Image (cartoon, helix red, strand yellow):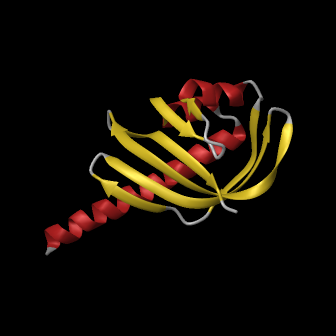
Amino acid sequence: MIEQDSCRQTALQQTEHLREIERRRLRALVDGDLALARALHAEDFQLVTPIGSMLSREEYLGAIAAGHMRYLSWEPGEIAVRLYGDAAVLRYQAQLEIHFAGQAVPRARYWHIDSYERRGGCWQTVWSQATAIR
């Protein structure tokens, strides 16, 4: 029984750790902290945007660095986590406000699904998809 409780606690700790990593990633994107954002996005990261475009890590973070994409706010709701050893899937709704290509995109709600992998002992997001809630 003690061993099962220990495993459960470890899974709960990992789940909360992943939620905190996701919140840090979102803050880094809003703050334009590209060093932290780069560390939290895997080299082979891919984003599928709400309009169906796919961006690599370099395209995504490059657009933020160049000012083509600027997050004004990104407020996640409750983050659900499914943990599978060295992989995890996170799902949540968020309110976003963004400027894209010089145009203000009205504040809106989106579903987000992010896939993480633990690589070299560190969690990084490898896939991300956002879907507008209508």
Residue 22 to residue 11: above or below: above
Q: Would residue 31 be found to the left or right of residue 119 on screen? A: right
| Residue 93 at x, y percent in the picture | 60, 61
Query: Residue at horizontal 61%, vertical 25%?
Result: 59
Q: Which residue is drawn at 46% across and 41% down?
A: 125
Examine the rendered structure and indicate whether residue 77 appears above or below residue 56: below
Residue 26, placed above or below residue 9: above
- 104 on left or right of 133: right
Residue appearing at x 52%, y 50% in the figure: 22
Rendered location of residue 45, percent (x, y): 48, 33
Residue 81, image x and y in percent?
Answer: 42, 60
Which quadrant is the C terminus positioned in?
Answer: bottom right
Using the image as rendered, state which of residue 129 and residue 10 is in the foreground.
129
Point out the image quarter for the N terminus.
Answer: bottom left
Q: Quadrant of residue 51?
A: top right
Asked whether residue 81 appears in the rendered view, the answer is yes
- Residue extending furthest toward the bottom: 1
Q: Residue furthest right?
A: 103
Is residue 42 at least partly visible in the picture? no
